[in-house]
């Protein structure tokens, strides 16, 4: 089994930053019933919390790491459900509690503006795959792709086609091969000029190609692509001091999610790295508590 070393050192005790993130996450959760828009803050805090938690527990063997992962899933999917529902309120499970979120204080346009983010959508999509949550995945996939790309935000066309491909796959609709082919073709650096070149080559394109390898179903080709993608991930996050100090790169989130998909599709994952926490990859905590 190939082992890809990470560029960071595991923490032996919670950092002051993690403690602050935990406190601010709890605060946002406590405010949601009275101020439902706090769900967006809760999601952002939870997304940071899980990455910091995994610097304490690189393999994800502790229950706290699974709880942190589930919290991102729950807050992200609740944020989109709240943004797009036509009901007066929704009831959602978050952090072991059913929360009642009213939609009456914020109009539809305002709510959807908070849910109009392809980045937030993809982050939540990844956590659906990691937590093996099919219903939430389908719910996300039913959000019209055009709603995720506000006209005032410049976006490369390949990223829109990639999002549409994931939705087609999740909903088991026809046209996946053509849509994925469009995403690959439009990711050519001569066409995709908005995405920074190193992010395009070393991060975003790797998602598309690795997903393609899952669809092809060849274990050797998939594992070769995963190994290469992890090397690129490490290169990207160590290319300058600011990135290296940013714990966002401690977890290869998209690669982990696609590796989970591969494993669940019957493709063995023969690459080992703390960029891919072992117990999240293997689903060791699945079924431990209702999510």
Image (spheres, rainbow, N blue to C red):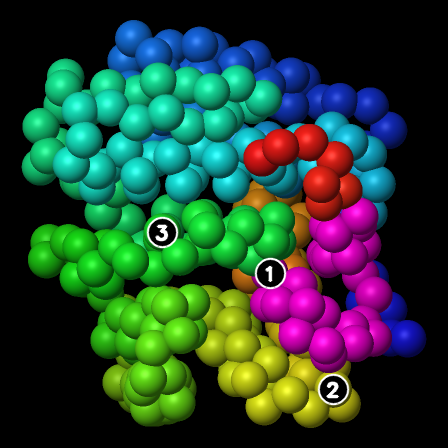
Quarter in which the N terminus is drawn: bottom right
Q: Mark 2 vs mark 1: which is more N-terminal?
A: 2
Circle nearer the viewer, 3 or 2: 3
Where on the picture, by quarter, is residue 180? bottom left
Q: Residue visible at 60% across and 60% down?
A: 257
Q: Secondary structure at mark 2?
A: helix
- Locate residue 271, reporting x and y percent: 81, 72
Q: Nearer the viewer, residue 244 or 115?
A: 115
First-in-chain label (3 vs 2)? 3
Q: Which residue is mark 1?
A: 257
Which residue of the protein is positioned furthest toward the right in this rendering?
1
Please tell me which residue is depicted at 23% across the width and 47% down the height of the picture.
116
Q: Please tell me how crowded label 2 is: few (under 14), some (14-19), or many (20+) other residues with Cα within 10 Å.
A: some
SS at mark 1 in the image:
helix
Vertical relation: 71 (above or below) 38:
below
According to the image, label 3 marks what residue? 139
Magenta residue check for 92: no
**Residue at the image position 10 percent from the left and 54 percent from the top:** 152
Q: Pointers 3 and 2 in contact (CB under 8 A)?
A: no
Residue 112 tag number: none
Residue 146 position (above or below residue 223): above
The CA span between labels 2 and 1 is: 16 Å
Residue 52 visible to an observer of this rendering:
no
Q: Would you name the residue on which mark 2 appears?
A: 219
SS for dot 3: helix
Q: Is 157 displayed left or right of 18 in the figure?
A: left
Which residue is found at the position 15% from the left and 36% from the top?
A: 86
Q: Is residue 261 magenta?
A: yes
Q: Position of residue 76 (x, y in %)?
A: 42, 39
In the image, the segment drawn in magenta is 257-284
Location of residue 32 (image quadrant)? top left
């Amino acid at each position: 089994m190939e082992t890809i070393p990470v560029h960071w050192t595991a923490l032996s005790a919670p950092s002051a930053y993690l403690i602050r993130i935990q406190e601010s996450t709890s605060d946002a959760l406590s405010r949601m019933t009275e101020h439902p828009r706090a769900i967006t803050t809760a999601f952002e805090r939870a997304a940071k919390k899980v990455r910091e938690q995994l610097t304490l527990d690189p393999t994800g063997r502790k229950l706290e790491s699974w709880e942190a992962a589930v919290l991102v899933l729950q807050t992200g999917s609740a944020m989109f459900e709240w943004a797009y529902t036509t009901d007066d309120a929704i009831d959602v499970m978050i952090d072991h509690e059913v929360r009642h979120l009213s939609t009456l204080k914020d109009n539809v346009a305002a709510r959807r503006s908070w849910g109009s983010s392809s980045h937030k959508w993809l982050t939540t999509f990844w956590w659906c795959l990691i937590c093996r949550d099919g219903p939430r995945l389908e719910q996300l996939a039913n959000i019209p792709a055009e709603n995720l790309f506000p006209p005032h935000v410049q976006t490369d066309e390949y990223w829109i086609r990639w999002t549409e491909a994931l939705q087609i796959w999740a909903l088991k609709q026809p046209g996946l091969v053509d849509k994925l082919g469009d995403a690959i073709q439009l990711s050519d650096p001569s066409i995709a000029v908005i995405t920074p070149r190193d992010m395009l080559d070393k991060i975003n394109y790797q998602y598309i190609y690795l997903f393609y390898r899952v669809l092809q179903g060849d274990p050797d080709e998939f594992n070769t692509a995963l190994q290469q993608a992890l090397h690129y991930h490490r290169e990207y996050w160590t290319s300058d001091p600011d990135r290296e100090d940013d714990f966002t790169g401690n977890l290869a989130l998209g690669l982990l999610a696609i590796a989970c998909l591969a494993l669940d599709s019957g493709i063995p994952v023969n690459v080992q790295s703390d960029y891919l926490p072992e117990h999240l990859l293997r689903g060791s905590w699945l079924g431990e508590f209702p999510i």
